[in-house]
Amino acid sequence: MVTIALAGKGGTGKTTVAALTIRHLMRRRLGTVLAIDADPATNLNLVLGLPSPLTVGDIREDMIAGIQNGSVGTGITRHDFLHTQIHKAVEEGDAVDLLAMGRPEGQGCYCAFNHLLRQVVDGLGKTYDFIVIDNEAGMEHLSRRTTRDVDVLLVVTDPTVRGVKTAESIVKLTDELQINVGKSMLVVNRVNGELPPALQKAVDEIGVELAGVIPADESIGEYDGVGTPLVSLPPESPSMKAIDSIVEKMLRVAVVG
């Protein structure tokens, strides 16, 4: 199993890069793919062309309410109940399945329950060849997994020096959250032409390997504008050509690691 996690500040096109990464894995038929939408905004389904899913957050809140009112806990163990509900929440596509995390854990201490929930989600992931996790910049979902191993953390930035510095901060956050990352890599998205010297200097100085550059691609905006899933992009589109090289590089790193 190879786990690829994506992170980046809002507006960098992180979810787009996640979708294109999944598109590459689907097109090459490299194995089964589970996409995990760990951004509370929950819009990965749109770029994958899948229905709006029931989220893990919804399941958690419903079960906590059931525990409190006594309607959950009779006739079935909590583990079996969660296992059934989580598997029902998986949206199955032609070549990719999707699990949406939804809202983060709310107030109140349900530590044993939340740990059990994470075990069920992690167990589901182990049945796939590839997991692609679309995170918010804070990566809270990764910090809460029972298994915190990530083969490749792909940090997406816009083509600005400030964006690159933010990407550096996100990489440093993995140490604070005790996430075991095999390799952190940088993607500069929506680039027009060559990287300006100041931007190239910033990329060189942060100490994170550059996985690649994705050019500004009008077709992305056109697809988003009419709601066409990005996984339908033709392989000859500039963004897909770039992502093909990036994912192949990531997978070599993951296999070597």
Image (cartoon, rainbow, N blue to C red):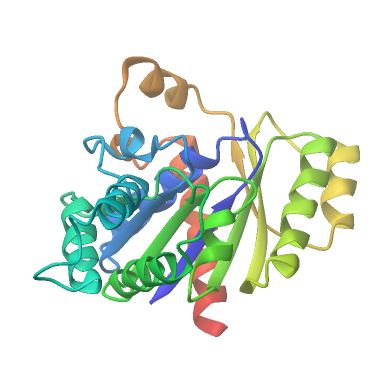
Task: Using the rendered view, name the quadrant where residue 159 is placed.
Answer: top right
Figure check: 220 above or below 113 = above
Q: Where 205 sits versus 257, above or below?
A: above
Q: How many marks?
A: 0
Q: Residue furthest bottom?
A: 256
Figure quadrant of residue 49: top left
The quadrant where residue 206 appears: bottom right
- Quarter placement of the C terminus: bottom right
In front: 34, or 42? 42
| Residue found farthest to the front | 69
- Lateral position of residue 48 relative to residue 191, left or right: left
Task: Identify the image quadrant of the N terminus.
Answer: bottom left
- Give the residue drawn at x 49%, y 22%: 218
Residue 249 visible within the image: no
Residue 53 in view in this figure: yes
Most extreme residue toward the left is: 75
Vertical order, 221 against 126 (above or below): above
Q: Is residue 52 left or right of residue 40?
A: left
Q: Is residue 186 left or right of residue 21?
A: right
**Which residue is more in the foreground, 231 or 40?**
40
Q: Position of residue 196 (x, y in %)?
A: 84, 35
Residue 243 rendering spot, x and y as whole percentages: 49, 49
Which of 200 and 93 lies nearest the eye of the viewer?
93
Q: Nearer the viewer, residue 157 or 137?
A: 137
The spot of residue 150 in percent (x, y) is 54, 71
Q: Residue at x 42, y 64 (%)?
A: 114
